[in-house]
Amino acid sequence: MVIFKLAISYMKKQKRKTLALLSSIILSVMLIFSMIVIRDSGYDSQIQEAKNLYGDYQIWFEGIDINKAKALEGDKDVIKIGKVKYFCEIVNKDTGVKLDLNSYDKDFITSLNYKLVGREPIKDGEIVIEKEALNQMGINDYTNKDIDMMLLNKYSDTEDINYIESFNKKFKIVGVLEKPKEYYNSLSNSIGGITSQGFVHENSDFPIKTEDTYKGTILLKSEDNTNKFLQKMEKKLNLSWDYLHENTEVSTAKLLKEMSIMNLENIQNTIIFIFISCLVIYNIFNIILQDMITQIGLMRAIGMSRKKVKLMFIQLGFIYILFGTILGIIFGTILSYFGVRLVYGYSTKLTINYMSIVCSFGVSTLSVSISTIMLIRKAMKLSIVDSIKNSEKYRKKLRRKRVKLSNNIIRTISIRNIWRNKSRTIITMLSITIVGIMFILNFGIKAHVKTNIEEGITGGMFGMSYGTVDKTVSGSFNGTDSLFYKLDEIIIEKINNIKEVSKIEPNFFNSEGHILISKDKISKAYEDELDRKNKLYQESYNNEYPLLIRGYSDEILESRESFIEEGQNLINNAEGRYKKVLLVNNTYSMITNSFESRVIDKVKVGDIITIKIPVYKNGLEKYETIKVQLAGIMDKIYAASQDGNVGVSGAQVIFREEDYRELTGQKYYNKIYVMAEKGKLNRVEEELEKLTNKYAFSTIGGKGEDQKVVGAQQTSEEKLSLIYQCLILLILSVNSIFIMRSNIISRKKEIGVLRAIGMSLKDINKTLIIEGEYYGVVASFIGSIIAIINYNMGIARANKSLIKGGFARTIKHNIPWTQVLILFLIFIFIGFLSVYLSRDRIDGVSISDGIRNID
């Protein structure tokens, strides 16, 4: 108890030092604690928001028969199930907006968090439909309104032969389903877009073949058993992911959190943050405890044993750890609250788990323990007399080295003082170097990646595949039917009139085609890729393979001529029995991670191939089989990096737009390529989103398209990274200020001597400024060199992968000058700040003190 009181007494007596040490611990703990809490709180809030918007069910199923649906419903782990019978799609032929048509079930609708306005359908011809889908069709007055829709069923038989059946039917709207605006905002600009729902009476009459499969939601007794339940049912009912999987939106939110936690960059940053925090605490703790060696000598002189001295400092360290960590957690909680609002844009409940507490105590315990152990070892090695005399070392060093002062006394004194305590200098410079490397790499890479994404060089396979095209406008895959979605002259003119748009290329696009060839004519590489998909998704093909169809104007065809590897262009090449096409025979393979795979083996110019395309004739949509002749074959560079490959899972054919119109009966363009002025890509996208926000579930694609999947996450991660960098720079600032003040205090007599021999306060301040700037400038220079080398090595590795994947464009090597300059300015500022805040210690040194010291 006596020793404990002695430790408390020492802390009270050395209030400034105690406060400085506690401040360093608090700041470090606050950094680590808030880093974990902000990230966890934000992602947990996003998970809860996904549950609020999409439903808090755990399992989604679709495309299964009634027997399997009953098997799911009867399982002991299931609390509740909401299921509907899926019939077919319905399409609004005026806009192309499509919906899934299901039987009405209140439990299913409730599980998806829809709000019903109106009543349920009670007879054939009545429909409940999503309000947003009606708005996208341009229907605002929907009460008891009749709408003309086309029933559409696209299916394949047991032989994998594909069919389209359609029929026009009138429905009366008896109810609408509403969801929060945030639901549609989160999906409207995504690659797939929104899948809207319509519900009719279960006994409705359909004059076409319907699917009559079931889809629904499952609420489990325990959310923790989700994966176990999926594995059990997948095996028991032989269902792949396409038929049975976790709530997609909620699982995606969970995955984003897991990606953030397991992200290599974040792990490295966390380790670096902990390491820097430990170094800074150790550095400040070591500076303070150095002055305690004299007190240790006095304690031992009055009879205190070594064991009791050790025990006192252990208890002292424990007090620092306890109070510093608790206060750090308290301030970290406050910082986390505001940090979550800043990073994620809204208030949320804080998630404080055991890991944040463990890491907080871990940082303080590790750094304080190491400092205490090293101090005790050092103090115990000294004799009692040496311990008491320890404080005189600086004056003696001065006297020994006075003869070494040269004409450049300011620089000499500064450099000598910097390296007087080598361990302190090395630790400080090491901390700055590591932070400098992290700063340049984090922000330099992010800035360079953003630039390359805008140019379509990096950013994901989709965004990198557009080449000269910057942005696209088209109907979303889930929300529209390509044959009826239209971009009329009015919307095209509006897009063309956007100030930052330099050029537009309207065209036709349909991903629902098929190429008819026997299995022995497809390449081995493509067959392997199809086998891979079949194992994962139970997708099988037999003589009919996916085909994407494009229709281009002569102007577009002329601009793409350089990509023709064999044969000739379609311009002025209309003669012959069959329609002419350009074949894109290369496709992406996940097995080889490249576009080397060819779909058709041994194909050549002039060959006749059979394709099946969707057409609109006699008021209905159907498949039509035609023969076309290959006028040319495009190279793999086109497949990989021009015009986009979203929706491509096999070959492509390009028609002249006149031939496409004639064959399909489609009058209006359904896709438009947009070229932006240099540096105006984001501005163009903003304008396109404004124009198409309520236009038939349109979606904006193009460069940077992949980022829409994780765009919100990346924005949050960038903000988190900025907060962490600011906090760690704050810790380093405290470290620099404390070192400067402690240097002045320990050299007070020396400064007095310098004043006594004629050095002005201005010159003394210069020596201190050189000292303050030396740490930051030299360490920043070393860090910059290391970071630039690593930065360009990363570019070289990325370029190697791009070339291997078949992409023609690569990342340019450069030096992140902006980040390097910012780094130097930050540490130059910190150097000046440390001297400025320490000037009160210099002003207090008198010349008389220096004269007495010389005597």
Image (spheres, helix red, strand yellow):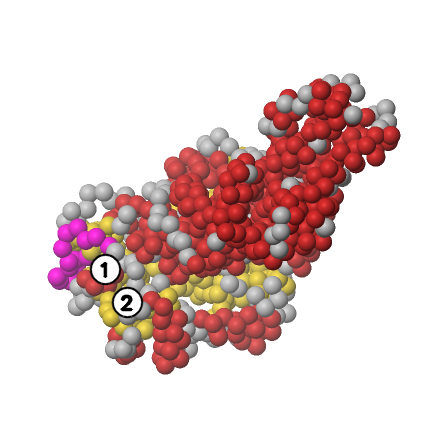
Residue in the image at 53% along x and 38% along y: 13
Measuring from the top left, give residue 175's x and y in whole percent: 17, 53
Q: Observer-nearest residue: 192 or 608?
A: 192
Q: Which residues are magenta?
A: 114-127
Is residue 692 in the magenta section?
no
In the picture, measured across the screen, residue 561 lies left or right of residue 30, that is: right
Q: Residue at x 78, y 25 (%)?
A: 855
Front one among 255 and 196: 255
- Mark closer to the chain start, 2 or 1: 1
Is residue 123 found inside the magenta-colored segment of the image? Answer: yes
Residue 383 % position (x, y)? 72, 50
Whether residue 422 is visible to the viewer of this picture, yes or no, is yes
Spatial CA distance of label 2 from label 1 is: 14 Å
Q: In the rendered image, which residue does mark 1 sit on?
A: 109
Instruction: Determine the image quadrant of residue 775.
Output: top right
Residue drawn 42% across the image and 77% down it: 159
Residue 236: numbered disc: none
Q: In the current view of this chain or complex, which residue is farthest to the front?
A: 302
361 or 844: nearer the viewer: 844
Instruction: Give the residue type at disc 1.
Output: Ile
Number of other residues with Cα within 10 Å of mark 1, as a class: few under 14, some 14 to 19, many 20 or more: many
> On the picture, is 289 further left or further right than 531?
right
**To which residue does mark 2 refer?**
219
